[in-house]
Amino acid sequence: MAAECNGAAQADAGRTTARLRCYANDFAAEFSLSEVELRFGQRFGGGEALSVHTWIVTSPVHLVTLSRVIAATIAAYEGRYGAIPCAGPDDRGRGAI
């Protein structure tokens, strides 16, 4: 069974050599006391609807670990390529946080 990501068929995720990779330019987050849900999607121009393709549910403890990994990645990227510009006035996200 092939998985789809924004209309492009990908290899079967059950195979050990398959890797499903989807581009994301829209992010949202919601949380409760015991879990955090991160949603990743792709928004196209022209008023097209958002296509959410990935949900990650984790604990707040693991979210802190993820934030440290992301911060270290940003620091390494900026050390190599220079500062990353902000996406614009809407780069604060549309999540429920």
Image (cartoon, grey):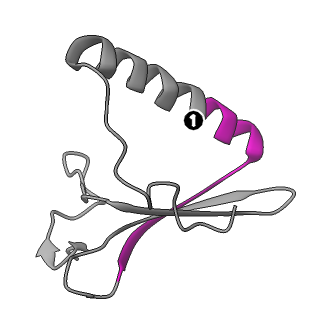
Q: Is residue 63 left or right of residue 15?
A: right
Q: Residue at x 69, y 57 (%)?
A: 36
Q: Quadrant of residue 97?
A: bottom right
Give the image location of residue 96, x and y in percent.
Answer: 67, 68
Residue extending farthest to the left is 8
Which residue appears farthest toward the top when viewing the image?
79
Q: Nearer the viewer, residue 87 or 66?
A: 87
Q: Considering only vertical position in the picture, is 94 above or below 22? A: below
Residue for point 23% across, 13% down: 80
Whether residue 31 is in magenta: the answer is no
Q: Quadrant of residue 23?
A: bottom left
Residue pointed to by mark 1: 66
Residue 56 magenta-drawn? yes
Q: Is residue 52 above or below residue 84?
A: below
Residue 8 % position (x, y):
12, 73
Q: Which residues are magenta?
A: 50-66
- Dot 1 falls on a residue whose secondary structure is helix
The residue positioned farthest toward the front in the image shown: 89
Toward the viewer: 12 or 75? 75
Which quadrant would the N terminus be assigned to in this image? Answer: bottom left
Task: Give residue 14's position: percent from left, percent from top.
Answer: 30, 60
Q: Is residue 86 above or below residue 68?
A: below
Q: Residue at x 68, y 34 (%)?
A: 64
- Residue drawn at x 31%, y 11% as measured from the top left: 79
| Amino acid identity at mark 1 | Leu
- From the viewer's perspective, is 66 left or right of 88? right
- Number of numbered labels in the structure image: 1
The one of 4 and 30 positioned closer to us in this rendering: 30
Image spot of residue 28 (x, y percent): 54, 64
Outermost residue on the right side: it is 33
The answer to which of 92 and 52 lies nearer the viewer is 92
